[in-house]
Image (cartoon, rainbow, N blue to C red):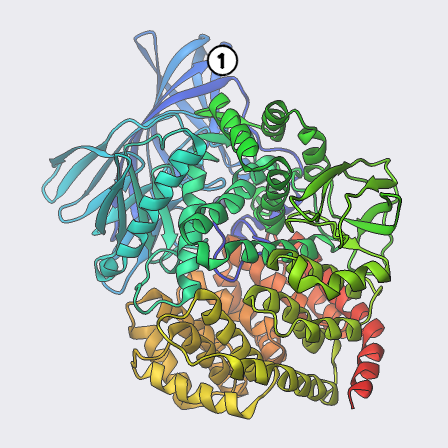
Amino acid sequence: MRFAPLARKLSACALALALTTFCVTQLHAQRLPETAIPSHYSLTLTPDLVAATFTGQESIDLTLTEPSNHITLNALEISFHTISATVGGKTLPATFSLDEEKAQATFQFGEPLPAGPVKLNISYSGILNNKLRGFYLSKTAKRNYAVTQFESTDARRAYPSFDEPAFKATYDVTLIVDDGDTAISNSPIKTDTPGPIKGKHTIAFETTPKMSTYLVAFLVGDFQCTSGSADGVAIRVCATPDKVALTHYGVGVAEYVLKYYNNYFGIPYPLKKLDLIGLPDFEAGAMENFGAITYRETALLIDEKTATLGAKQQVELVIAHEMAHQWFGDLVTMKWWDNIWLNEGFATWMENKAVAHQHPDWDIDQEVAQGLDGTLNLDSQPTTHAIRATANTPHEIEQMFDGISYGKGGAVLHMVENFLGEETFRQGVHNYLSKHLYGNATAEDFWSAQTETSKQPIDKIMDSFISQPGVPLLTFGEDSHGKVAVDQHRFYSTPSISADPKQKWTIPVCFLTEEAKHCEILTPDQTTIEAPKSKVFFANAGGTGYYRSTYPAKVYDKILASAETKLTPVERIMFSGDEWAQVRANKATVGDYLNLVTALKSDPNQAVLSSAVSGAQGIYTRVASTKEERDALSAWVRKNFAAEYAKLPAPSPSDSPNTIKMRSQLFGLLGVYGNDPTVLKQAAELTNKYLDGSTSVDPTMAQTATYISARNGDTVLFDKLQKIYETSTNPERQETALRLLAMFQDPVLLKRALDYALTDKVRNQDSLIQFAIGLQRDETRAITWQYIQDNWEKLKKEVTPEMGGILVGSTGSFCSAEDRNAVTAFFAAHPVPATERALKHATDSINSCIEFRTLQEPNLKQWIAAQK
Ligand SMILES: [Zn+2]
């Protein structure tokens, strides 16, 4: 699964309000007994798109491991009609009882069924809900669609099932749909015949391979597709008919990625077809259903000619992410949800690899380094958790889908790959997958395969990063005859928290040398490390180390002096990130950091500049509390970056991706933080031209310009954006326009945007994101928070699994004790289900900001005084 846009690095949340009371307090596991093992499902479903209901005929072939007079499986919001079991030619009826708390149904038989094969026959009905999960209704202005989203625990809403990832089975799916409609499922269509009644036709799909319940998909409506193929696999990108023109870009990407993965994994894509479908209502970013991947429209459907560079990259990364899951997740699945990182960490790491291979000029490695830096910051907070954590209830499982499982999981894999070398690591991946095809696996299975293949202690390294929370800080001493003193302890970005001295890691540490990099394994007991001879001592060669480093002043100065010549852009990103971490830990001052940014201001790589500047933006928003301080920082921005911006050539179609992003980055920096009057004027002009339909404006620049303009925008601009949102058939343009509405500083317009977010015009998948945006920005935070409190009864109706977590998590942008108390008091009185972790994390962020400001604001004042 992939996060919704803007949701990355924020915790997900889970179940709907109706289930709150018992799930929160429930501590015991909800696992099914292991006495009934399913092997095959036959499912015939008839959805009624107008009445929003469906009926189902199901048979499940299973094996009883012991005689039993009852069988328990998962079912939720299902009405059972008839239930029976066929055993040895005899059919036995059953009664049923429901345990709603566990989302389980137990079928009771009049006599014990013998151990061995049993066929369960179930007829039932259900609802096409509006909760964006299970079998649900997705709508356009013209009509309804019936679609599915089952991960993690919602297949049970569509068909009674043994709804746990280790109960893999094959499927024969049949869908009875209206004439004129089509249906998409995991495998190709086998037969399509008229009937059973007038106005309907029956689509039967080929038998699937063995797969987990959460990967099954059924999609019904008038979808239209563009076709392609790669390595003999039929590929289609599908959408509602009004958006079929936007499906071409995705076909090309999927074709490329499929070939790349076939080659990388050394295991061909196992199905005959692969469909990628954009859905009008979709909560996450995308979902990796085996052979039928579903997407939020903005994550799949773009117009190549008008899309921003960022949108193209996003689409490619999401496609590559979900396709990686076809192997990592679908073909080989984690045994249980505590190892969800095996799916998500892997897909996060792999998506970058595939896209970097296709687009070397996109500098994906630098974006990965920025991501790693962000993950290290997240994992330096006291409320972080280990990658592998206990998750038993649906609430706990939903909360596993966060920046740690994705970002840290991916980062640890990348570190191990950098240490072993690409080919050795790839061989280990191949061996792991080959051993568990169509089966399930654990973290141990993965690192055992890597350890066996490489003959290196990968098990020790990975275990220390997967099972322990937090980030190691390596403090290096002076070089003494080739030996360098090193201390490791857990790093916290909040200085008032001290680390447990016993927590240690086994870490591959890679050094810069004059030729190839040189790596050593640092074990928990080691206090010195062999460092190779080199002009610059830099202990994160390749920039993939999952740790922070700090050096003696003389060594640091030497690295800084030769950063541009000796360090790669990726290494410079990690170097400035380490310095920012030192500021957060109160070991360096904001002045030191601003001086570092000044030194890096002419860096030719946009990603390096962007990482360095993000710390400066943090100083502006988190440390500066007065107008005078912010004005001084704005003046510093103009003084240092206006000239850099002026140096860039005028936009041209032959611009490199780096130039496109650099121009937009500097323009945004000067417009938002520099309040540069020339840039503000240019932004207004570009915005008007772009919104009036001019195609001569570079879309990436136009997006930044509209952002700058919206912050200072008036009613005319607001109306224009709202109209684009309501009338455009381009999901990227629509989404951008909608998001901008929540960024207007004018209180009347901001309130209008928030009112609008709660109307039927804004999809459920987007409503709460508007409030999260309002909370995340300084200039809109207070009004948005007041609005949320005043309108909670309306807002809480919009809470869905992921969105509640995003909303609660966004309150972490506050930076005062008074606001923290207000936030915790409010959510104590108005609890949002499955957001315990998000709320803790938000409180933690606020506390950490208060401490940061208290410690560093005097340093900022001093630095400002020294600038005069
Ligand atoms: Zn995923």
- Please report the residue visible at 53 percent of the width from the left and 43 percent of the height from the top: 344
In the picture, measured across the screen, residue 780 lies left or right of residue 648, that is right
- Please report the residue visible at 51 percent of the width from the left and 72 percent of the height from the top: 662
In the picture, measured across the screen, residue 78 lies left or right of residue 164, that is left
Is the residue marked 1 within 8 Å of ligand 1, measured from its CB? no
The answer to which quarter of the image holds residue 210 is: top left
Q: Picture coordinates of residue 447 (x, y %)?
A: 62, 29
In the picture, measured across the screen, residue 47 lies left or right of residue 560, that is left
- Please report the residue visible at 46 percent of the width from the left and 8 percent of the height from the top: 115
Q: Picture coordinates of residue 419 (x, y %)?
A: 65, 38
Asked if residue 148 is positioned above or below residue 858 in the image, the reply reads above
- Amino acid carrying label 1: it is Ser
Q: Tell me the crowding category of disc 1: few under 14, some 14 to 19, or many 20 or more residues within 10 angstroms, Cα based.
A: some
Of 764 and 708, which appears nearest the observer?
708
- Please report the residue visible at 48 percent of the width from the left and 62 percent of the height from the top: 798
Whether residue 809 is visible to the viewer of this picture, yes or no, is yes
In the picture, measured across the screen, residue 89 lies left or right of residue 360, that is left
Asked if residue 52 is positioned above or below residue 818 in the image, the reply reads above
Q: Picture coordinates of residue 827 (x, y %)?
A: 66, 63
Whether residue 131 is visible to the viewer of this picture, yes or no, is no
Asked if residue 846 is positioned above or below residue 390 in the image, the reply reads below
The residue carrying mark 1 is: 68
The answer to which quarter of the image holds residue 784 is: bottom right
Of 316 and 474, which appears nearest the observer?
474
Tag count? 1
